[in-house]
Image: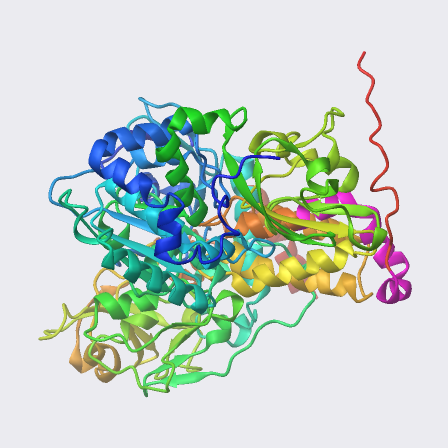
Amino acid sequence: MKVTIDGITVDVEPGTSILNAARQIGGDIVPPAMCYYSKLQGSGGKCRTCLVKVTKGSEKDPRPMPKLVASCRTGVMDGMEVQNITSPEVIEARKGVVEMLLINHPLDCPVCDQAGECHLQDLGFEHGAAKTRYEFDRRTFEKIDIGDKIQLHMTRCILCYRCVFTADQITNTRLHGILNRGDHSEISTYISKAVDNDFSGNMIDVCPVGALTDKTFRFKNRVWFTKPVEAHRDCDKCCGKVTLWYKGEDVIRVTGRKDVYGEVEEFICNTCRFDKKKTADWVIEGPRKVSHHSVISANHYEFTPLPVVKTNPVLMEANKEQFERETRL
Amino acid sequence: MGRKLLLEHINVPGINTFDVYRSKGGYASVEKALKTMSPEAIVEEVKKSGLRGRGGAGFPTGMKWSFLAKPEGVARYLVCNGDESEPGTFKDRYLMTYIPHLLIEGMIVSSFALGANTSYIYLRGEMMPQVRILERAIAEAKAKGFLGKNILGTGYDLELYVQPGGGAYICGEETALLESLEGKRGNPRIKPPFPAIAGLYGCPTVVNNVESIAAVVPIINEGGDEYAKIGIGRSTGTKLISAGGNLKKPGVYEIELGVPVEEFIYSDEYCGGIANGKRLKAVVAGGSSVPILPANLILKTINNEARLMSYESLSDGGFVSGTMLGSGGFIAYDEDACIVRNTWNFARFYHHESCGQCSPCREGTGWMEKVLHRLEYGHGKMSDMDLLVDVSKKIEGNTICPLGDAAAWPVASAIRHFRDEFEWHVTNASEATSTNYGLAHYADPLKVVETA
């Protein structure tokens, strides 16, 4: 099936969503996704950041779709034409969605452990306004410890439902869910319960914001000061392929390997995540490549830096003069 | 006097019992449909009747039925949407309370037409008396052989269940209703797939409003063509209107579509005018989610023609100067009503009822409510009106289900038509908390735009 997104045509399998077709093209035309997670069935459609405009339905039925559609949950049709960043309407709607996502968000990035790898932060940076128009109290919740390893800070949550799908699909039992409705809805275990099973830690990885954080890593370090290293070990529960986050000689965090879209390649178990924090536990593969768009890539050079002083005859001449002037004194 | 099709025998004592209902010609359509008609013929009759969904959207019922997928070996379901919770609408509750057998009769015929052997009536959680009334009526019908196995010896089986919901407005959205009926959290599903392909328990499902299903009864009794003769244009048949607000005689009226709005408000046959000798200021014509119109625009369209109670005439002028028939919740406001307070009240409702699944509606409804609250209580700013319009635009059309649109329209339309009243709330803030803006110019005759 052929689909054209922002003027770029790509051939995809039938049944692919517009978002995944865009990801096959890659680059700037990929709509942002806060709630969609390709590894979780049924996710997506909720955050509305991936809205796109379908200007031509298909080859058979060329009518445009009347409303903007969520690209993560709309399948492509043969000959479909989609506008993402080329449509002012989409940009405007996305700006609106980002504003809505941020009005009840505490914006406590300076103390949030997710900062630096937070999708909402990226989205706010790209589409948000410098100032808010919201002049009311933001909703707040008490922090809850769900288990001894995970802390839930509901105030930051954007209700993407990813952690609910994770618990449903990756773990044996789901102990948490959505309570209440509207802007009072919250992720909760209702009666305080510890979410504790072998794969519960994946909820931290799938959370696009800082609502679910790793208690063993909380306030230890900013992520952009850590060194991500790829490693693996033989694990009888999971694939054992992880990213180790080093501070100096110490492993201070273990996560799944996240791709460009922030999705883990494979889910890992809690033993790997929380209990194996010694270099000796792991077989090191090498430094993790981080996209240069991410702040985590700061000071990670993948190339030889250009020499600072270029062999410019004019500069060399000027330097000589200056050298002479200064040595004379 | 207009024809009554649904409420013809409403004043007969004991019409809520099977025997009286039967003696007035009830269940004739079941006999006719099951014994003499094929399911396809019934769908065809309903298509010919031009019946449009009475729940609000006005989608042709026959068309909806014909979209139902019919794969072999998969059950099909008919679900009756009785989750009527739109502020201003109370027609379905009235119908189910006083003439429950009409709904059951319609359910039997419709289920037969769709090939459903199990059908559900989903009621709003607050309607517990109606649940009991319907369950008693179902038991009566079953005892007389109109429900259960082998109905009237035709070999058709139908089980009918009443399911109360938890009391959430959002469960009136058809996919949220199905989720709730399945025992899950009532969050609207992301469409496609539509319920006609994968609905209840993943099977093809039709969800219809109570009144739409009841209207199938006269269609079968008299034939689709006869039914289509009533009404005007593409708005065929009769419609129950729940008239409320500052009217002399509020209540449920069955009208032939096409009655002029002016006649509906002022004639003694219907609402009998505005209560206490006051003057009309504004009207919400179809339940809280449709745009509100000032008195002059509800009585006359922008082209100075009389506005009629029909799908087309009420929406004449689009969003600029029109509204919608919606679910028929007709609310009239007199000159003492405060439009700002009313808009805040509606916004409060939508804030309370938003399911919280998708972000524009979850956050935007709360934001609009807070801004309107500020305006109503004298802390507003001049920029608030533009802010509200902008927020409503950011919600409208960007949500999973129509609740976002329903929350955005009343706010946007109130500011469009009553902007000076909103501004007065800012400029005369202290006065606005104790007195009202009054009628102002909202009932003035429309200026006729001269055409060149």
| Left or right, residue B327 beside residue A232 | right
Q: Position of residue B280 (x, y in %)?
A: 79, 46
Could you tell me which residue is drawn at 13 percent across and 44 percent down? Answer: B155
Q: Main structural element of the magenta stretch: helix, strand or loop?
A: helix
For residue B97, above or below residue A53: below
For residue A55, above or below residue A112: above
Q: Position of residue A122 (x, y in %)?
A: 48, 57
Q: Residue furthest top?
A: B452
For residue B364, above or below residue B109: below
Tally of numbered tags:
0
Q: Quadrant of the N terminus of chain B?
A: top right
Front residue of this view, candidates B64 and B98: B98
Q: Quadrant of the C terminus of chain B?
A: top right
Find the magenta span and give its range: B411-435
Could you tell me which residue is drawn at 24 percent across and 30 percent down? Answer: B40
Based on the picture, tell me whether residue B422 belongs to the magenta stretch.
Answer: yes
Based on the picture, tell me whether residue B348 belongs to the magenta stretch.
Answer: no
| Left or right, residue B362 beside residue B141 | right
Q: Position of residue B402 (x, y in %)?
A: 49, 48
The colouring scheme, among rainbow, by chain, secondary structure or one colour, is rainbow
